[in-house]
Image: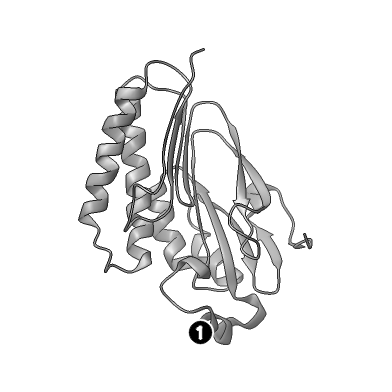
Amino acid sequence: MKKAVFQTQKIIFALGTVCTLTAYNGESLQAFDRAKARILEIDRKVSAAYPRAVTLMARGYAAEETKRILKLSGVSEALIVIGETVVNMGTPRRIGLQDPFGAAGENFSYVDIGEKAIVSAGLYQQGFGESVNYRRHGGNALVGLTLIGENAVKLSALCNSAVKLSATEAMDLLNDTDVEAIFVSRSQVVTATDGLHKRPTRRQAA
């Protein structure tokens, strides 16, 4: 199996952070070039003046567009990462989850996903203040949220709404969806939806 890796760092301004594309089969470099061009096109249409909530949606859209382009090019094994938005194609992979209390790149847990998307957000990424959310929800205020489902655009929209809520309110919001979720509260309690087969727990100190 031929592996081609293409990385671009800091190519996105309004969408934020690093975009990494990795494909594991076929001649993928031309497909990567097309995907990169599409991401940059989306980025140009998202003004830096937009709130971060909008750029979260744009990252989801860019990731799904990249998946579409790679599939049309015959790529069946790939991992697309745009900031905290992840889309996996093909073989199930283990994805680390950012610790909202830790440094960038420091994970507190992981999930195994197949052909799915993951979107994570925290108050540190949003355009609204943590203090407002804390005054409203106290220790139950969310500081980190991870959603797992079929489509990154849908997850981004849900994530933008749910991260402003308490864990209980966010779970109620997601009850009628097919989305799985992991919630991290300000009091460092981690809760997951039933489909992930996890019980409420308290975050372990690093």
* Front in this rendered view, residue 52 or 92: 52
Q: Position of residue 182 (x, y in %)?
A: 61, 57
Q: Residue furthest bottom?
A: 135
Q: In the picture provided, is 195 more to the left or to the right than 36? A: right
Residue at horizontal 41 percent and vertical 56 percent from the top: 156
* Front in this rendered view, residue 60 or 39: 39
Residue at horizontal 47 percent and vertical 24 percent from the top: 77
Q: Position of residue 20 (x, y in %)?
A: 44, 39
The answer to whether residue 46 is above or below residue 188 is above
Question: How is this picture coloured?
Answer: one colour
The answer to whether residue 19 is above or below residue 16 is above
Q: Amino acid at mark 1?
A: Val
* Front in this rendered view, residue 71 or 2: 2
How many numbered discs sit on the rendered protein? 1
**Quarter occupied by residue 51:** bottom left
Residue tagged 1: 132
Q: Residue furthest top?
A: 1
Q: In the picture provided, is 177 more to the left or to the right than 50? A: right
Residue at horizontal 53 percent and vertical 78 percent from the top: 130
Q: Position of residue 132 (x, y in %)?
A: 51, 84
The answer to whether residue 101 is above or below residue 108 is below
Q: Label 1, secondary structure: give it.
A: helix
Q: Quadrant of the C terminus?
A: bottom right
Residue at horizontal 57 percent and vertical 73 percent from the top: 166
How packed mark 1 is, by other alpha carbons closer than 10 Å (few <14, some 14-19, many 20 or more), is few
